[in-house]
Amino acid sequence: MGFSQMMELLQIKEKGRIVFCNAGEFYVAIGKDAVLLSELLGLKVSCLKAEVCKVGFPIKSLEKYANLVMQKRYGYIVYYFNKEKASLEIVESYIGEKTNNIVVKNINCYKCRNKVKYYRRTDEYIEAVAKLYEEDIEKDKLEKSKKEETRKWFINKKKKTD
């Protein structure tokens, strides 16, 4: 069983709580938890394997990120995988009011869809196209944000003139 399979089983066991587990010097969340944490906290998403996203942060930053998740009122559980004993230990746990109801395991980025990570060496051409697509997505988000700000400004102006 690999790390991703272990994490998927822990997600099933924990029923909606965000699951973190150490991988080296980082705590990692994968799949639907990574997608949620990207939306909630703006953590950068990368590919764990094709069609499965991951996010992570240094072990020493656990308190900071645990507090941020608690402020959003989501439940979470943090496991420490002890390689020597081949065992999992619960480091921290919080039962929040909200649960992760996301069903997708990825943000559906161009890199995952085209399995860039399957190559031993990064394909620079696919990488360039992936960046282009992701920049377009960011531009679209920025435009929507500006339109929303303009709409709010007009609503506030109308209220002031009434």
Image: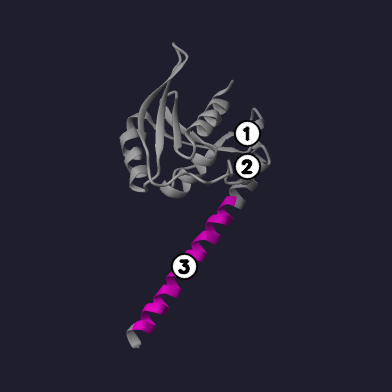
Q: In the image, is 35 to the left or to the right of 22?
A: right
Q: Nearer the viewer, residue 47 or 29?
A: 29
Q: In the image, is 96 to the left or to the right of 2?
A: left
Q: Which residue does the image show at 45% across and 74% down from the upper left?
A: 151
**Does 114 appear in magenta?**
no
Find disc 3 in the rendering and name its residue: 146
Q: Is residue 152 above or below residue 158?
A: above
**Does 150 appear in magenta?**
yes
Find disc 1 in the rendering and name its residue: 117
CB-based contact (under 8 Å), mark 1 and mark 3: no
Image quadrant in which you'd find residue 17: top left
| Disc 2: CA contacts within 10 A as few (<14), some (14-19) or many (>=20) | many
SS assignment at label 3: helix
CB-based contact (under 8 Å), mark 1 and mark 2: yes
Q: Amino acid at mark 2?
A: Lys
Mark 1 or mark 2, earlier in chain: 2
| Disc 1: CA contacts within 10 A as few (<14), some (14-19) or many (>=20) | some
Query: Which contiguous range is marked in magenta?
Result: 134-159
| Disc 3: CA contacts within 10 A as few (<14), some (14-19) or many (>=20) | few
Find disc 2 in the rendering and name its residue: 111
Cα gap from disc 1 to disc 2, whole angstroms: 8 Å
